[in-house]
Image: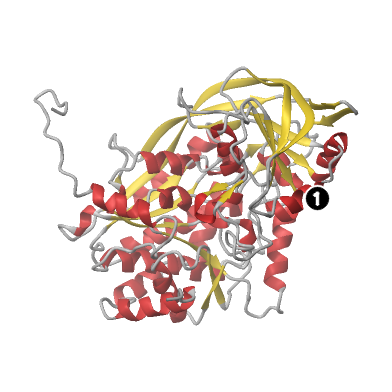
Amino acid sequence: MKRLPALLLALCSLTALAQRAPLVTPAEQSAARDIVPDVLRAHVRFLASDLLEGRGPGTRGDALAQAYIASQFEALGLKPAAEDGSYFQRFDLVGITSNPQQMTFRAPGGTAELKFHEDFIAVSGVQAPEAKLEESELVFVGYGIQAPEYQWDDFKGMDLRGKTLLILNNDPEDDPQLFAGRTRLWYGRWDYKYEQAAKVGAAGAIILHTTPSAGYPWQVVQTSWSGEQFELPASEEGPRVQVKAWTTEAATRRVLQLAGKDLDALRAAAQKRDFQPVPLGVRVSTRFPSEVRRRPTANVLAMLPGSDPKLSQEVVLYSAHHDHLGKKEGGKPGEDTIYNGALDNAAGVAAMLAAAKAFRALPQPPRRSILFAAVAAEEQGLLGSQYLSEHPPVPHGRVAANINIDGANIHGRTRDLTVIGLGKSNLDALIIGLAKTQGRVVKADQLSDRGFFYRSDQFNFAKQGIPAAYFGSGMDFVGRPEGWGKQQREAWEAKHYHQPSDELRPEWDFSGAVEDVRLFFLLGAHISRAPELPRWNRGDEFESARLRALEALKAPKMPRTSEGASK
Protein backbone atom coordinates (compact mmCIF):
# COMPACT_ATOMS: atom_id res chain seq x y z
CA MET A 1 0.00 0.00 0.00
CA LYS A 2 1.37 3.38 -0.96
CA ARG A 3 1.78 5.97 1.77
CA LEU A 4 -0.90 8.65 1.74
CA PRO A 5 0.23 12.24 1.31
CA ALA A 6 0.99 14.01 4.58
CA LEU A 7 -2.04 16.30 4.49
CA LEU A 8 -4.44 13.43 3.76
CA LEU A 9 -2.99 11.42 6.63
CA ALA A 10 -3.41 14.42 8.89
CA LEU A 11 -7.02 14.93 7.83
CA CYS A 12 -7.81 11.28 8.56
CA SER A 13 -6.20 11.68 11.97
CA LEU A 14 -8.15 14.87 12.57
CA THR A 15 -11.43 13.05 12.00
CA ALA A 16 -10.45 10.38 14.50
CA LEU A 17 -9.29 12.94 17.06
CA ALA A 18 -12.47 14.97 16.75
CA GLN A 19 -14.43 11.91 17.81
CA ARG A 20 -12.45 11.71 21.07
CA ALA A 21 -12.10 15.29 22.32
CA PRO A 22 -13.27 18.74 21.26
CA LEU A 23 -10.65 20.67 19.34
CA VAL A 24 -11.08 23.83 21.43
CA THR A 25 -13.18 24.40 24.54
CA PRO A 26 -14.96 27.70 25.28
CA ALA A 27 -12.62 28.25 28.26
CA GLU A 28 -9.55 27.82 26.06
CA GLN A 29 -10.96 30.16 23.44
CA SER A 30 -11.56 32.77 26.12
CA ALA A 31 -8.08 32.36 27.62
CA ALA A 32 -6.48 32.72 24.17
CA ARG A 33 -7.84 36.27 24.00
CA ASP A 34 -5.33 37.23 26.70
CA ILE A 35 -2.63 36.91 24.03
CA VAL A 36 -2.39 40.42 22.58
CA PRO A 37 0.25 42.44 20.71
CA ASP A 38 1.21 44.67 23.64
CA VAL A 39 2.17 41.67 25.76
CA LEU A 40 4.48 40.35 23.05
CA ARG A 41 6.01 43.75 22.29
CA ALA A 42 6.72 44.51 25.96
CA HIS A 43 8.65 41.28 26.53
CA VAL A 44 10.64 41.76 23.33
CA ARG A 45 11.42 45.36 24.27
CA PHE A 46 13.17 44.30 27.46
CA LEU A 47 14.85 41.09 26.28
CA ALA A 48 16.23 42.75 23.14
CA SER A 49 17.31 45.99 24.80
CA ASP A 50 20.93 47.13 24.69
CA LEU A 51 21.06 46.66 28.47
CA LEU A 52 21.25 42.89 27.93
CA GLU A 53 24.16 43.28 25.50
CA GLY A 54 22.98 40.57 23.12
CA ARG A 55 22.40 37.85 25.74
CA GLY A 56 25.64 36.02 24.91
CA PRO A 57 26.02 32.76 26.87
CA GLY A 58 27.68 33.16 30.26
CA THR A 59 27.50 36.96 30.20
CA ARG A 60 25.80 39.51 32.43
CA GLY A 61 23.12 39.88 29.75
CA ASP A 62 22.53 36.14 29.79
CA ALA A 63 22.00 36.22 33.56
CA LEU A 64 19.67 39.23 33.26
CA ALA A 65 17.56 37.43 30.68
CA GLN A 66 17.31 34.37 32.93
CA ALA A 67 16.31 36.53 35.91
CA TYR A 68 13.66 38.35 33.89
CA ILE A 69 12.12 35.13 32.59
CA ALA A 70 12.14 33.53 36.05
CA SER A 71 10.46 36.60 37.52
CA GLN A 72 7.75 36.41 34.86
CA PHE A 73 7.19 32.73 35.63
CA GLU A 74 6.95 33.54 39.33
CA ALA A 75 4.52 36.40 38.71
CA LEU A 76 2.28 33.97 36.83
CA GLY A 77 2.30 31.58 39.78
CA LEU A 78 4.23 28.85 37.96
CA LYS A 79 6.25 26.44 40.09
CA PRO A 80 10.06 26.17 39.86
CA ALA A 81 10.92 23.02 37.92
CA ALA A 82 14.68 22.64 38.23
CA GLU A 83 16.04 19.75 40.29
CA ASP A 84 17.35 22.03 43.05
CA GLY A 85 13.91 23.57 43.62
CA SER A 86 14.69 26.79 41.75
CA TYR A 87 13.75 28.03 38.30
CA PHE A 88 17.35 27.59 37.08
CA GLN A 89 18.73 24.39 35.60
CA ARG A 90 22.35 25.44 35.85
CA PHE A 91 25.17 23.93 33.82
CA ASP A 92 28.58 24.89 32.52
CA LEU A 93 29.63 25.75 29.01
CA VAL A 94 33.15 25.56 27.71
CA GLY A 95 33.96 28.76 25.84
CA ILE A 96 36.65 28.53 23.17
CA THR A 97 38.06 31.66 21.56
CA SER A 98 40.23 30.69 18.60
CA ASN A 99 42.64 32.98 16.80
CA PRO A 100 43.42 31.52 13.35
CA GLN A 101 45.27 33.65 10.84
CA GLN A 102 45.76 31.52 7.77
CA MET A 103 45.40 28.05 6.37
CA THR A 104 48.05 26.72 4.00
CA PHE A 105 47.47 24.16 1.25
CA ARG A 106 50.53 22.62 -0.44
CA ALA A 107 50.80 20.39 -3.49
CA PRO A 108 53.67 19.47 -5.81
CA GLY A 109 52.44 22.16 -8.18
CA GLY A 110 52.25 25.05 -5.73
CA THR A 111 50.82 26.57 -2.57
CA ALA A 112 47.59 28.37 -1.67
CA GLU A 113 47.33 30.59 1.40
CA LEU A 114 43.77 31.25 2.59
CA LYS A 115 43.02 34.33 4.67
CA PHE A 116 40.94 34.06 7.81
CA HIS A 117 37.48 35.64 7.62
CA GLU A 118 37.74 36.42 3.92
CA ASP A 119 38.48 32.92 2.59
CA PHE A 120 37.87 30.64 5.55
CA ILE A 121 36.49 30.48 9.04
CA ALA A 122 37.97 28.00 11.50
CA VAL A 123 37.46 27.14 15.13
CA SER A 124 39.14 24.69 17.44
CA GLY A 125 37.55 21.28 17.55
CA VAL A 126 39.25 20.45 20.84
CA GLN A 127 38.90 22.00 24.27
CA ALA A 128 42.63 22.71 24.47
CA PRO A 129 45.00 25.71 24.28
CA GLU A 130 46.01 24.91 20.70
CA ALA A 131 44.49 23.37 17.57
CA LYS A 132 46.61 22.29 14.65
CA LEU A 133 46.82 20.46 11.36
CA GLU A 134 50.32 19.51 10.26
CA GLU A 135 50.62 18.52 6.62
CA SER A 136 47.32 16.65 6.87
CA GLU A 137 46.25 14.98 3.64
CA LEU A 138 43.16 16.58 2.10
CA VAL A 139 40.46 14.16 0.93
CA PHE A 140 37.22 15.09 -0.81
CA VAL A 141 34.45 12.95 0.69
CA GLY A 142 31.40 14.31 -1.12
CA TYR A 143 28.63 15.01 1.37
CA GLY A 144 30.31 13.06 4.17
CA ILE A 145 27.17 10.98 4.75
CA GLN A 146 26.67 7.43 5.97
CA ALA A 147 22.97 6.56 5.69
CA PRO A 148 22.30 2.79 5.65
CA GLU A 149 18.56 3.29 5.09
CA TYR A 150 19.40 4.94 1.76
CA GLN A 151 22.23 2.49 0.95
CA TRP A 152 24.56 5.48 1.00
CA ASP A 153 28.15 5.63 2.25
CA ASP A 154 30.46 8.43 1.15
CA PHE A 155 33.47 6.96 2.97
CA LYS A 156 33.47 3.46 1.40
CA GLY A 157 35.69 2.09 4.15
CA MET A 158 38.67 4.36 3.38
CA ASP A 159 41.09 4.91 6.25
CA LEU A 160 40.64 8.61 7.00
CA ARG A 161 42.49 8.78 10.29
CA GLY A 162 44.57 11.93 10.59
CA LYS A 163 43.31 13.33 7.31
CA THR A 164 41.36 16.51 6.63
CA LEU A 165 38.01 16.07 4.90
CA LEU A 166 36.61 18.49 2.35
CA ILE A 167 32.83 18.16 2.56
CA LEU A 168 29.90 19.51 0.55
CA ASN A 169 27.12 21.25 2.46
CA ASN A 170 23.54 19.91 2.37
CA ASP A 171 22.69 16.40 1.12
CA PRO A 172 22.24 15.03 -2.43
CA GLU A 173 19.14 16.55 -4.01
CA ASP A 174 19.30 15.79 -7.73
CA ASP A 175 17.33 12.54 -7.39
CA PRO A 176 13.98 13.00 -5.56
CA GLN A 177 14.01 9.27 -4.74
CA LEU A 178 17.19 9.71 -2.68
CA PHE A 179 17.06 11.24 0.78
CA ALA A 180 14.18 13.74 0.48
CA GLY A 181 14.94 15.56 -2.73
CA ARG A 182 15.29 19.27 -2.03
CA THR A 183 14.15 18.87 1.56
CA ARG A 184 17.23 19.00 3.75
CA LEU A 185 17.58 16.23 6.30
CA TRP A 186 19.81 15.90 9.36
CA TYR A 187 22.45 14.48 7.02
CA GLY A 188 22.72 17.89 5.37
CA ARG A 189 23.53 19.81 8.54
CA TRP A 190 27.02 21.03 9.41
CA ASP A 191 26.92 19.51 12.91
CA TYR A 192 26.22 16.05 11.48
CA LYS A 193 29.19 16.41 9.13
CA TYR A 194 31.62 17.45 11.85
CA GLU A 195 30.40 14.54 14.02
CA GLN A 196 30.93 12.05 11.20
CA ALA A 197 34.42 13.40 10.51
CA ALA A 198 35.29 12.85 14.16
CA LYS A 199 33.87 9.32 14.13
CA VAL A 200 36.11 8.26 11.25
CA GLY A 201 39.17 9.70 13.00
CA ALA A 202 39.76 12.72 10.77
CA ALA A 203 42.05 15.47 12.03
CA GLY A 204 40.10 18.24 10.37
CA ALA A 205 36.85 18.90 8.53
CA ILE A 206 36.23 21.70 6.04
CA ILE A 207 32.71 22.42 4.78
CA LEU A 208 32.36 24.15 1.43
CA HIS A 209 29.97 27.08 1.82
CA THR A 210 27.66 28.34 -0.88
CA THR A 211 24.57 30.42 -0.22
CA PRO A 212 22.22 27.92 -1.93
CA SER A 213 23.65 24.91 -0.07
CA ALA A 214 23.69 26.62 3.33
CA GLY A 215 20.50 28.64 3.02
CA TYR A 216 22.30 31.79 4.18
CA PRO A 217 25.15 34.02 2.93
CA TRP A 218 28.82 33.88 3.93
CA GLN A 219 28.34 36.75 6.37
CA VAL A 220 26.24 34.47 8.57
CA VAL A 221 29.15 32.02 8.79
CA GLN A 222 31.46 34.93 9.62
CA THR A 223 29.30 36.24 12.46
CA SER A 224 28.12 32.89 13.83
CA TRP A 225 31.57 31.25 13.90
CA SER A 226 33.67 34.22 14.99
CA GLY A 227 34.48 35.10 18.58
CA GLU A 228 33.91 32.80 21.52
CA GLN A 229 32.31 29.46 20.62
CA PHE A 230 30.60 27.30 23.21
CA GLU A 231 30.24 23.60 23.82
CA LEU A 232 29.13 21.35 26.61
CA PRO A 233 32.11 19.93 28.51
CA ALA A 234 33.70 17.23 26.37
CA SER A 235 33.64 13.57 27.24
CA GLU A 236 37.16 12.23 27.68
CA GLU A 237 36.54 9.28 25.37
CA GLY A 238 34.56 11.08 22.67
CA PRO A 239 36.21 11.49 19.24
CA ARG A 240 37.13 15.05 18.19
CA VAL A 241 38.53 16.73 15.12
CA GLN A 242 41.31 19.23 15.73
CA VAL A 243 39.90 21.89 13.39
CA LYS A 244 36.37 22.64 12.20
CA ALA A 245 36.33 24.99 9.23
CA TRP A 246 34.32 26.54 6.41
CA THR A 247 35.67 27.80 3.10
CA THR A 248 34.13 29.98 0.40
CA GLU A 249 33.50 28.52 -3.03
CA ALA A 250 36.11 30.80 -4.62
CA ALA A 251 38.77 29.78 -2.10
CA THR A 252 37.92 26.11 -2.54
CA ARG A 253 38.33 26.35 -6.28
CA ARG A 254 41.81 27.79 -5.77
CA VAL A 255 42.75 24.84 -3.55
CA LEU A 256 41.37 22.32 -6.04
CA GLN A 257 43.38 23.92 -8.83
CA LEU A 258 46.49 22.79 -6.95
CA ALA A 259 45.17 19.24 -7.21
CA GLY A 260 44.23 19.59 -10.86
CA LYS A 261 40.59 18.95 -9.94
CA ASP A 262 37.39 20.67 -11.05
CA LEU A 263 34.87 21.43 -8.30
CA ASP A 264 31.87 21.02 -10.59
CA ALA A 265 33.02 17.57 -11.68
CA LEU A 266 33.61 16.51 -8.07
CA ARG A 267 30.21 17.82 -7.06
CA ALA A 268 28.55 15.88 -9.88
CA ALA A 269 30.29 12.66 -8.87
CA ALA A 270 29.15 13.13 -5.26
CA GLN A 271 25.49 12.91 -6.31
CA LYS A 272 25.73 9.17 -6.92
CA ARG A 273 25.80 6.14 -4.61
CA ASP A 274 28.96 4.80 -6.23
CA PHE A 275 30.95 7.91 -5.29
CA GLN A 276 34.43 7.12 -3.98
CA PRO A 277 36.47 9.47 -1.73
CA VAL A 278 39.05 11.42 -3.70
CA PRO A 279 42.53 11.95 -2.21
CA LEU A 280 43.56 15.32 -3.61
CA GLY A 281 47.33 15.17 -3.26
CA VAL A 282 47.18 18.36 -1.20
CA ARG A 283 48.48 18.84 2.33
CA VAL A 284 46.80 21.30 4.68
CA SER A 285 48.40 23.00 7.67
CA THR A 286 47.23 25.48 10.24
CA ARG A 287 48.02 26.15 13.86
CA PHE A 288 46.32 28.60 16.19
CA PRO A 289 45.99 29.23 19.92
CA SER A 290 42.69 29.12 21.77
CA GLU A 291 41.57 30.58 25.05
CA VAL A 292 39.50 27.97 26.87
CA ARG A 293 37.36 28.79 29.88
CA ARG A 294 34.25 27.57 31.65
CA ARG A 295 31.23 29.83 31.86
CA PRO A 296 27.97 29.21 33.72
CA THR A 297 24.55 29.48 32.13
CA ALA A 298 21.11 28.04 32.80
CA ASN A 299 17.86 26.86 31.31
CA VAL A 300 14.90 28.51 33.03
CA LEU A 301 12.22 25.93 33.90
CA ALA A 302 8.72 26.39 35.32
CA MET A 303 5.80 24.04 35.74
CA LEU A 304 2.04 24.46 35.79
CA PRO A 305 0.97 21.28 37.64
CA GLY A 306 -1.84 19.35 36.00
CA SER A 307 -5.20 18.73 37.62
CA ASP A 308 -5.63 15.03 36.84
CA PRO A 309 -4.12 12.75 39.54
CA LYS A 310 -2.70 10.34 36.94
CA LEU A 311 -2.19 12.41 33.78
CA SER A 312 -0.47 15.20 35.72
CA GLN A 313 2.63 12.97 35.78
CA GLU A 314 2.88 13.68 32.03
CA VAL A 315 3.86 17.07 30.65
CA VAL A 316 3.47 19.19 27.56
CA LEU A 317 6.82 20.90 27.02
CA TYR A 318 7.07 24.43 25.60
CA SER A 319 10.54 25.62 24.64
CA ALA A 320 12.10 28.84 23.36
CA HIS A 321 15.76 29.82 23.49
CA HIS A 322 16.67 32.94 25.47
CA ASP A 323 20.23 33.47 24.20
CA HIS A 324 21.72 35.30 21.25
CA LEU A 325 25.20 36.19 19.97
CA GLY A 326 26.30 38.85 22.48
CA LYS A 327 28.53 41.70 21.29
CA LYS A 328 30.60 42.05 18.14
CA GLU A 329 34.33 42.21 18.74
CA GLY A 330 36.54 44.87 17.21
CA GLY A 331 33.77 47.24 16.18
CA LYS A 332 34.56 50.65 14.73
CA PRO A 333 33.80 53.85 16.72
CA GLY A 334 30.09 54.57 16.51
CA GLU A 335 29.28 51.14 15.06
CA ASP A 336 26.39 49.14 16.51
CA THR A 337 28.11 46.12 18.04
CA ILE A 338 25.21 44.52 19.96
CA TYR A 339 23.46 41.51 18.49
CA ASN A 340 20.11 42.26 20.12
CA GLY A 341 18.33 39.19 18.76
CA ALA A 342 14.88 40.76 18.88
CA LEU A 343 13.26 38.38 16.43
CA ASP A 344 15.77 35.63 17.16
CA ASN A 345 14.68 34.86 19.81
CA ALA A 346 13.37 37.48 22.22
CA ALA A 347 10.16 37.20 20.21
CA GLY A 348 9.99 33.44 20.79
CA VAL A 349 10.44 33.83 24.54
CA ALA A 350 7.77 36.53 24.50
CA ALA A 351 5.44 34.12 22.73
CA MET A 352 6.08 31.39 25.31
CA LEU A 353 5.45 33.79 28.19
CA ALA A 354 2.21 34.92 26.53
CA ALA A 355 1.12 31.29 26.15
CA ALA A 356 1.93 30.70 29.83
CA LYS A 357 -0.24 33.68 30.75
CA ALA A 358 -3.10 32.18 28.74
CA PHE A 359 -2.79 28.86 30.59
CA ARG A 360 -3.07 30.71 33.89
CA ALA A 361 -6.24 32.38 32.61
CA LEU A 362 -8.00 29.01 32.37
CA PRO A 363 -10.59 28.46 35.13
CA GLN A 364 -8.71 25.31 36.18
CA PRO A 365 -5.34 23.82 35.22
CA PRO A 366 -5.24 21.36 32.33
CA ARG A 367 -5.20 17.63 33.07
CA ARG A 368 -1.55 17.15 32.07
CA SER A 369 1.14 19.40 33.51
CA ILE A 370 2.71 22.11 31.38
CA LEU A 371 6.49 22.59 31.46
CA PHE A 372 7.93 25.86 30.17
CA ALA A 373 11.62 25.88 29.26
CA ALA A 374 13.57 28.96 28.21
CA VAL A 375 16.72 27.22 27.06
CA ALA A 376 20.25 28.57 26.77
CA ALA A 377 22.94 28.53 24.07
CA GLU A 378 20.79 27.57 21.10
CA GLU A 379 22.88 29.72 18.81
CA GLN A 380 25.94 27.71 19.81
CA GLY A 381 24.55 24.42 18.56
CA LEU A 382 21.32 23.78 20.52
CA LEU A 383 23.32 23.26 23.72
CA GLY A 384 20.71 24.23 26.30
CA SER A 385 18.06 21.96 24.85
CA GLN A 386 20.66 19.20 24.53
CA TYR A 387 21.43 19.53 28.24
CA LEU A 388 17.73 19.59 29.12
CA SER A 389 17.01 16.57 26.91
CA GLU A 390 19.82 14.67 28.66
CA HIS A 391 18.75 15.82 32.16
CA PRO A 392 14.95 16.03 31.96
CA PRO A 393 12.84 16.76 35.04
CA VAL A 394 10.49 13.95 33.93
CA PRO A 395 11.26 10.80 31.89
CA HIS A 396 11.16 11.21 28.11
CA GLY A 397 8.23 8.81 27.85
CA ARG A 398 6.14 11.12 30.03
CA VAL A 399 6.68 14.16 27.82
CA ALA A 400 3.56 14.20 25.67
CA ALA A 401 4.96 16.63 23.09
CA ASN A 402 7.34 19.52 22.59
CA ILE A 403 6.06 22.80 21.17
CA ASN A 404 9.08 24.85 20.19
CA ILE A 405 8.94 28.58 19.41
CA ASP A 406 11.77 30.19 17.49
CA GLY A 407 11.01 33.63 16.08
CA ALA A 408 7.69 35.33 15.35
CA ASN A 409 5.72 36.92 12.56
CA ILE A 410 6.39 40.67 12.50
CA HIS A 411 4.71 41.52 9.19
CA GLY A 412 0.98 41.07 9.86
CA ARG A 413 -1.68 38.43 9.42
CA THR A 414 -1.36 35.53 6.98
CA ARG A 415 -3.83 33.25 5.25
CA ASP A 416 -1.55 30.28 5.75
CA LEU A 417 0.55 28.54 8.37
CA THR A 418 3.86 26.79 7.78
CA VAL A 419 4.51 23.52 9.62
CA ILE A 420 8.19 22.56 9.67
CA GLY A 421 8.31 18.78 9.38
CA LEU A 422 4.76 18.31 8.13
CA GLY A 423 4.03 14.60 7.82
CA LYS A 424 6.19 13.48 10.72
CA SER A 425 3.59 13.08 13.49
CA ASN A 426 -0.13 13.11 14.19
CA LEU A 427 0.27 16.58 15.68
CA ASP A 428 -0.26 17.76 12.10
CA ALA A 429 -3.95 16.94 12.36
CA LEU A 430 -4.41 19.15 15.40
CA ILE A 431 -2.51 22.04 13.83
CA ILE A 432 -4.58 21.79 10.63
CA GLY A 433 -7.81 21.83 12.63
CA LEU A 434 -6.73 24.76 14.79
CA ALA A 435 -5.57 26.75 11.78
CA LYS A 436 -8.95 26.16 10.18
CA THR A 437 -10.67 27.85 13.14
CA GLN A 438 -8.69 30.98 12.20
CA GLY A 439 -9.57 30.69 8.52
CA ARG A 440 -6.03 29.62 7.62
CA VAL A 441 -4.61 26.71 5.69
CA VAL A 442 -1.55 24.66 6.59
CA LYS A 443 1.36 24.33 4.19
CA ALA A 444 4.53 22.32 4.36
CA ASP A 445 7.84 24.10 4.84
CA GLN A 446 8.12 26.48 1.90
CA LEU A 447 11.90 26.68 2.36
CA SER A 448 12.47 22.98 2.89
CA ASP A 449 16.02 23.15 1.53
CA ARG A 450 17.08 25.05 4.67
CA GLY A 451 16.65 22.06 7.02
CA PHE A 452 14.83 24.10 9.66
CA PHE A 453 13.57 21.06 11.57
CA TYR A 454 17.17 20.20 12.48
CA ARG A 455 18.21 23.78 13.26
CA SER A 456 16.15 24.55 16.34
CA ASP A 457 15.66 23.12 19.80
CA GLN A 458 12.85 20.69 19.02
CA PHE A 459 15.44 18.51 17.28
CA ASN A 460 17.08 17.52 20.57
CA PHE A 461 13.74 16.51 22.05
CA ALA A 462 12.77 14.65 18.87
CA LYS A 463 16.00 12.66 19.10
CA GLN A 464 14.78 11.44 22.49
CA GLY A 465 11.53 10.33 20.84
CA ILE A 466 9.33 13.24 21.94
CA PRO A 467 6.82 14.26 19.22
CA ALA A 468 7.61 17.84 18.31
CA ALA A 469 5.64 20.69 16.77
CA TYR A 470 7.51 23.56 15.16
CA PHE A 471 5.44 25.95 13.09
CA GLY A 472 4.90 29.61 12.35
CA SER A 473 3.24 32.02 9.99
CA GLY A 474 3.12 31.32 6.30
CA MET A 475 4.00 33.67 3.47
CA ASP A 476 0.58 34.58 2.07
CA PHE A 477 0.05 37.91 3.84
CA VAL A 478 -3.35 39.56 4.03
CA GLY A 479 -3.44 42.75 1.96
CA ARG A 480 -0.11 42.05 0.27
CA PRO A 481 0.66 40.97 -3.31
CA GLU A 482 1.66 37.41 -4.16
CA GLY A 483 5.30 36.76 -3.35
CA TRP A 484 5.59 39.64 -0.87
CA GLY A 485 6.05 37.33 2.11
CA LYS A 486 8.88 35.40 0.51
CA GLN A 487 10.57 38.68 -0.43
CA GLN A 488 10.37 39.89 3.18
CA ARG A 489 11.77 36.62 4.47
CA GLU A 490 14.71 36.66 2.08
CA ALA A 491 15.44 40.34 2.72
CA TRP A 492 15.46 39.77 6.47
CA GLU A 493 17.85 36.82 6.15
CA ALA A 494 20.18 38.82 3.91
CA LYS A 495 20.24 42.00 6.03
CA HIS A 496 19.29 41.18 9.61
CA TYR A 497 19.72 37.47 10.42
CA HIS A 498 22.48 37.20 13.05
CA GLN A 499 23.27 40.88 12.58
CA PRO A 500 23.16 43.82 15.03
CA SER A 501 20.20 45.17 13.05
CA ASP A 502 17.88 42.47 14.48
CA GLU A 503 16.22 45.01 16.76
CA LEU A 504 12.66 45.82 17.79
CA ARG A 505 11.25 48.41 15.39
CA PRO A 506 8.12 50.59 15.64
CA GLU A 507 6.75 49.23 12.36
CA TRP A 508 6.66 45.62 13.54
CA ASP A 509 3.11 44.31 13.19
CA PHE A 510 2.34 41.67 15.82
CA SER A 511 -1.21 40.90 14.63
CA GLY A 512 -0.06 37.76 12.81
CA ALA A 513 2.16 36.75 15.72
CA VAL A 514 -0.86 36.89 18.02
CA GLU A 515 -2.70 34.38 15.82
CA ASP A 516 0.33 32.09 15.81
CA VAL A 517 0.81 32.26 19.58
CA ARG A 518 -2.86 31.53 20.14
CA LEU A 519 -2.32 28.39 18.08
CA PHE A 520 0.73 27.48 20.18
CA PHE A 521 -1.42 27.81 23.28
CA LEU A 522 -4.48 25.98 21.90
CA LEU A 523 -2.36 23.12 20.60
CA GLY A 524 -0.79 22.57 24.02
CA ALA A 525 -4.15 22.91 25.73
CA HIS A 526 -5.66 20.21 23.55
CA ILE A 527 -2.71 17.85 24.04
CA SER A 528 -2.91 18.43 27.79
CA ARG A 529 -6.45 17.03 27.98
CA ALA A 530 -6.49 14.49 25.13
CA PRO A 531 -6.91 10.85 26.24
CA GLU A 532 -4.01 9.63 24.08
CA LEU A 533 -0.42 10.78 23.74
CA PRO A 534 0.75 12.17 20.39
CA ARG A 535 2.88 9.85 18.25
CA TRP A 536 5.31 9.93 15.37
CA ASN A 537 3.93 8.59 12.12
CA ARG A 538 4.87 5.01 11.31
CA GLY A 539 8.35 4.77 9.83
CA ASP A 540 9.44 8.25 10.91
CA GLU A 541 13.10 8.63 11.83
CA PHE A 542 12.20 9.32 15.50
CA GLU A 543 9.54 6.63 15.97
CA SER A 544 11.92 4.00 17.35
CA ALA A 545 13.27 6.42 19.97
CA ARG A 546 9.69 7.10 21.13
CA LEU A 547 8.94 3.41 21.42
CA ARG A 548 12.08 2.92 23.51
CA ALA A 549 11.13 5.85 25.78
CA LEU A 550 7.66 4.44 26.37
CA GLU A 551 9.03 0.96 26.96
CA ALA A 552 11.48 2.32 29.53
CA LEU A 553 8.53 3.42 31.68
CA LYS A 554 7.49 -0.20 32.04
CA ALA A 555 10.88 -1.35 33.32
CA PRO A 556 10.78 -2.30 37.01
CA LYS A 557 12.71 -0.04 39.33
CA MET A 558 15.71 -1.62 40.99
CA PRO A 559 15.36 -1.99 44.76
CA ARG A 560 17.67 0.25 46.72
CA THR A 561 19.72 -0.40 49.84
CA SER A 562 19.47 1.72 52.96
CA GLU A 563 22.48 3.65 51.68
CA GLY A 564 20.53 4.54 48.54
CA ALA A 565 22.52 2.44 46.07
CA SER A 566 20.93 -0.16 43.80
CA LYS A 567 21.38 -3.73 44.92
Specify whether residue 210 is in view: no
Specify whether residue 265 is in view: yes
Colour basis: secondary structure
**Relative to 362, is 459 on the left or the right?**
right
Q: Could you say where residue 278 lies in the image, as x and y percent from the top left? A: 73, 39
Q: Quadrant of residue 126?
A: top right
Pick the quarter of the image with the N terminus: bottom left
Total of numbered circles in the picture? 1
Q: Which residue is pictured at 33% across the width and 43% down the height?
A: 392
Q: Which residue is mark 1?
A: 265
Q: Which residue is pictured at 68% across the width and 44% down the height?
A: 276
Q: Could you say where residue 315 lies in the image, as x and y percent from the top left? A: 29, 55
The amino acid type found where label 1 is placed reads: Ala
Secondary structure beneath dot 1 equals helix
Q: Could you say where residue 148 lies in the image, as x and y percent from the top left? A: 51, 50
Position above or below: 262 against 243: below
Position above or below: 291 against 24: above
Question: Which of the two residues, 346 or 317, is positioned nearer the viewer here?
Answer: 317
Q: Could you say where residue 434 lies in the image, as x and y percent from the top left? A: 42, 75
Position above or below: 413 against 491: below
Pick the quarter of the image with the C terminus: top left
Position above or below: 452 against 68: below
